[in-house]
Image: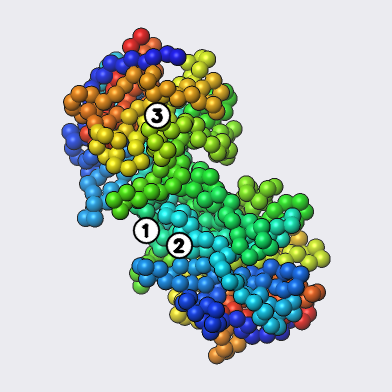
Amino acid sequence: MMQFHWRKLGLIFEPKKITGRPWLTEFAQAPCAIEVDDAIRVYFSCRPAADHEGRYVSYSSFVDLDKDDLTRIIRVAQHPIMALGAKGTFDEFGTYPVSVIQDGDRMLAFYGGWTRCESVPFNVGIGCAVSLDHGISFKRLGPGPIISYSPDEPFILSGPKIRFFEGRWILFYIAGRKWITFNGRPEPVYRIRMATSSNGLNWIKLNRDLVETRIEEDECQASPDVFFDGSLYHMFFCYRRSFDYRGKEGGYRIGYAYSRDLVQWTRDDSKAGINVSESGWDSEMVAYPHLFKWRQKTYMFYLGNQVGRAGFGLAELLD
Amino acid sequence: MKWKKIGKVFDSSRHPDFGEYDGFAQSPQALVLADRVRVYFSIRKKDEVGKFLSNVSFVDFDRTMSKIIGVAKRQVISLGSLGDFDEHGIFPFSPFHHGGKVLAYTCGWSRRVSVSVETSTGFAISDDGGYSFRKFGIGPVLSASLNEPFLVGDSFVRFIGGRFRMWYIFGTGWLDFPGESNADRIYKIGYAESEDGVNWERLNRALLPDVLDENECQALPSVLLMDGVYHMVFCFRHATGFRKDPTRGYRLGYASSFDGRSWTRNDAYLGLQGSQGDWDGNMQCYPHIFSCNNEIFLLYNGNDFGRFGFGLAKLDSF
């Protein structure tokens, strides 16, 4: 199998440097890039300051990069791409992360919607929204989620990545399987899943884990980002320990798996070719990989320490 | 319809076998067995934070519904674990016979922060004739969807014409009303079909028109097919003031259909009223219509959502 080698281009978007947008004070999580008219638009999720109880809401928005220099920002969105959900809905407290795809004249966004629970801190469902203004703003297809909880995927449906392969829609996402308690705090355990659809609305779940665990039985996996090279499907994803994962030890790392049929995946993290740096913004974690092909080159957008608190960075695939 | 009211037939708060509970016997639902009628219901107990948890239990009647002959001696179905959709209660619980087993659809409760609760429908199977049930998976079989965004529950299922048919409720809004400290929920009755009882295809619309106003809440559809006609008994109420004000609380409604999907509502046809000053004088809710020994029975709860048990009526004539 191919060994990937990456050259890190550094932290390219830092929310701390942005002013005049109170909804964007910290975090730029789960980058997702798409070409628009005059730029490469990178969607991300961010947060206003926490409330008096330390709780966050999250919005999704975008930053536009120079087509001739993906490390140069030419525009920052004026607003989030959508408001939070109505009272009692699945996305009342957050829309994070988001995955955007062009569909004819319109753009579709699949996103994680966050609600707050009593016994556990949150639950997440997957929603869908449409943009008719080239991705500046999105409107929900409906007030509820497009992927529902089910017997084998009971909670925490999140991290959607929308693709169109072999004439059908493919949604890679994560599903929670249990909550564990560590130091008195409930922590979700989640794995990578997949669903398919002929119309983007009605989804058939595969109902199985795509990627085996490696570091422990309750390893948590996220951000399944898949591309096709003409003969093989490649997946970059991130994984972490189920407990005590907020620092360097146990924190997110980027893994890799490949498949010929989208169903059977072979994991080989040694091929991923990207790891934490000696120092700096990504010295404790590398997380939420998103691959983007542009002008014969392949780039990876990714997050660093504290899962994107400082912003997102970029790496370039070496031949 | 003309009903003979038998009166209250079971009160968990006065039954010695249920002394550890805090009353309630909500949403009675019958499973007709060879030698008895088992009536499942939800009973409440306070948890460590002082909030109620609903658990499923049952009481057995003889087949004429005139005498209690037994009660559940052990747990019928467990509540969910941390973070599960049914962690904070199962209410209601709806059993039926299918393929030599007893199947049940549950309404699981999970507490929220900005609103009080979210519910979803679970599926469970009994291998011991209805004494205990194992869950089909950890998660629900019917939950929030694009246009039914929350509060899916009260599922009532029958296998008719080679398909599983489900009547259930779904939420349409959490609304803030003047003078109310918490948001109040609005819900309507819907319909879905399934080949296997697990994967459901929704009709995606409310089955019944409102008679009060657009914020009318409709709950607990119970359906009986007789001579080609589907009869539905359900309950409905105003969105606010329904707990204390008897004029705004639950009443029983009725609708009929030839296919289970298109319904004609005619509440007056049911012909069952509360008895002033009696156990069902202020409220009638959570009905369950069933047949046994060529008789049609109606189980239902009365005042205070069934805190003081459930009652029974027997159909005299159509």
| Residue A159, picture quadrant | top left
Give the x, y percent position of residue A133.
Answer: 40, 33
Q: What secondary structure is found at the residue carrying circle 2? A: loop
At x 48%, y 57%, the residue is B80
| Residue A200, picture quadrant | top right
| Amino acid type shown at disc 2 | His
The chain identifier of the residue carrying mark 3 reads A
Do the residues at pointers 3 and 2 share their chain? Answer: no
At x 75%, y 64%, the residue is B225
Q: What secondary structure is found at the residue carrying circle 1? A: loop
Judge the density around disc 1: few (<14), some (14-19), many (≥20) Cα neighbours within 10 Å: some
Kindly identify which numbered label has been placed on residue A118.
1
Give the x, y percent position of residue A76.
Answer: 26, 31
Cα distance, mark 1 to mark 2? 10 Å
Q: What secondary structure is found at the residue carrying circle 3? A: strand
Work out whether A132 lies above or below B148: above
* Residue picked out by circle 3: A237
Work out whether A103 lies above or below B158: above
Position of A84 with respect to B93 (left or right) is left
Give the x, y percent position of residue A303.
Answer: 29, 30
Cα distance, mark 3 to mark 2? 34 Å
Judge the density around disc 2: few (<14), some (14-19), many (≥20) Cα neighbours within 10 Å: many
The chain identifier of the residue carrying mark 2 reads B
| Amino acid type shown at disc 1 | Glu
Cα distance, mark 3 to mark 1? 30 Å
Quarter of the image for the C terminus of chain A: give it: top left
Position of A112 with respect to A199 (left or right) is left
Q: Do callouts 3 and 2 mark residues in contact (Cβ within 8 Å)?
A: no
* Residue picked out by circle 2: B88
At x 40%, y 68%, the residue is B47
